[in-house]
Image: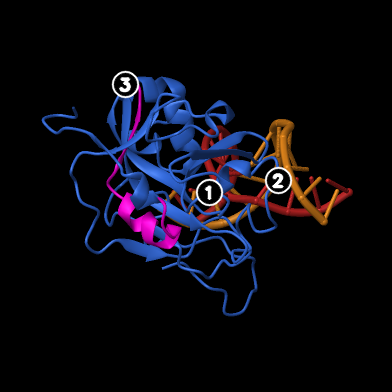
Chain colours: A blue, B orange, C red
Amino acid sequence: MIGRRRLVPISRRLLAGDPLDVAPRLLNTLLVCGERVVRIVEVEVYRGADDPASHAFRGATKRNATMFGPAGLLYVYFTYGMHWCANVVCRPEKVAGAVLLRAGAPLCGLEEMAAARPAARRERDLCSGPAKLCQALGITGAHDGADLLTGDLGIRLCTDGTEPPQDPGNGPRIGITRAAELPWRWWVPGDPNVSVPAGARLRQPAGVAGAPVVS
DNA sequence: CTTTGGATCGTCT
DNA sequence: GACGATCCAAAGG
């Protein structure tokens, strides 16, 4: 229970679809790790052979194997030599697709999250980015392949009945160089934990004429 | 508030 | 050998 609401697992059938359909439906769901609970407020789609920005673009490797697993697994990867990031795996087995969890609104276990993230000065610094979210919840490579529906490794994806936003924010993905124009990021409009709010300007190489700006 | 550069290492070329 | 699905502190306005 969160407050007076009962938690219900997400259905695996919902997650088995095209991540482009699944992603906006994951907004406002809950990620539960022991005492720590966050509401997912920002996500990004990564697909397979048709997505040059995806780890799965060039086929299965040891690192990305979980992306080819059944829907409902957690794909956790290590990047920039120091950060972990987590995805919800979509599609049936052997077909790559996932939704990156980019930001969450802290609901429960805020003190544990703050202890795990000493750099965070404000509540909205706890989970406002894909690596921050993992650090706050204690998610690491040890959780790669966890089943979010059975909770075999202590992490669950649930809903408390809050519907996804009717008119979610939508725009280009963050931090990639290939296929950077595809609007495959979704967020809960107005939520202070969204990592790159609508209207924020992104860094662009100086002197690039007509450089796209994220809206 | 914004911008800039450094940290740091597994993965794939 | 190059490059990240990033974050943070420091410096400047």
Q: Which residue is mark 1?
A: A93
Please name the amino acid that badge 2 sits on. Thr
Residue A131 in magenta?
A: no
The answer to which of marks 1 and 3 sits earlier in the sequence is 3
Q: Which residue is mark 3?
A: A35
For image coordinates 63% across by 64% down, the residue present is A178
* Mark 2 lies on residue: A61
Q: Which residues are drawn in magenta?
A: A16-34
| Helix, strand or loop under label 1 | loop
Q: Are marks 2 and 3 in contact (CB under 8 Å)?
A: no
Which chain letter goes with mark 1?
Answer: A
Q: Residues within 10 Å of mark 2 (few under 14, many from 20)?
A: few
Q: Which residue is outermost to the bottom?
A: A210
Name which residue lies at 48% across and 42% down: A130
The answer to which quarter of the image holds residue A188 is bottom left
Query: What is the quadrant of the C terminus of chain A in the image?
Result: bottom left
Q: CA distance from mark 1 to mark 3?
A: 31 Å
Q: Which residue type carries mark 3? A: Glu
Residue B10 appears at what percent x and percent y? Answer: 72, 35
Image location (x, y in percent) of residue B11:
73, 42
In front: label 2 or label 1: 1
Number of residues whose C-alpha sits closer than 10 Å to that of mark 3, classed few (under 14), some (14–19) or many (20 or more): few
